[in-house]
Amino acid sequence: MVRWSRSVLLACALASTAARADPLVDGLTNLLSQRGGDGAFGAAAGEDTVVVTSEALLALRALGLGGSTEAQEAERFL
């Protein structure tokens, strides 16, 4: 089960009120949908979870979400 942080929920809520889709929010939503219950990314797609989780963590940090629950759980996984 994916738990969403407040900042991610806010970003998604703001995107849903926009007249057109925001590719950044769409990408973030897609990224977070790839997260497993252990905080790792990529397992469902058969990817190397260490590599994919590292890349996902870098992306979250680049978006200013390095302190989010998702980022913290990815750090714990790594």
Image (cartoon, rainbow, N blue to C red):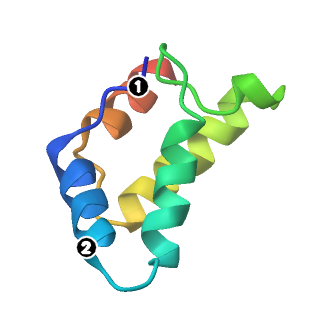
Q: Residue at x 35, y 85 (%)?
A: 19
Q: Amino acid at mark 1?
A: Val
Residue 41 pos. (x, y %): 60, 32
Residue 71: give its label: none
9 w.r.t. 2: above or below: below
Q: Which is nearer the N-term, disc 2 or disc 1?
A: 1
Q: CA distance from mark 2 to mark 1?
A: 23 Å
User: In the picture, residue 3 is in which quadrant?
Assistant: top left
Q: Viewer-proximal residue, 12 or 70? A: 12
Q: Which label lies toward us, 2 or 1?
A: 2
Q: Residue at x 47, y 52 (%)?
A: 29
Q: Amino acid at mark 2?
A: Thr
Q: Which residue is mark 2?
A: 17
Q: Residue at x 15, y 45 (%)?
A: 6
Left or right, residue 47 beside residue 28 = right
Q: Which residue is mark 1?
A: 2
30 w.r.t. 69: above or below: below
Residue 53 pos. (x, y %): 59, 36
Image quadrant where one finds the N terminus: top left
Residue 17 pos. (x, y %): 25, 73
Dot 1 surroundings within 10 Å: few (below 14), some, or many (20 or more)?
Answer: few
Q: Residue at x 44, y 78 (%)?
A: 22
Helix, strand or loop status at disc 2? helix
Q: Viewer-proximal residue, 56 or 23? A: 23
Residue 15 pos. (x, y %): 32, 70
Q: Viewer-proximal residue, 67 or 1? A: 1
Dot 2 surroundings within 10 Å: few (below 14), some, or many (20 or more)?
Answer: few
Helix, strand or loop status at disc 1? loop
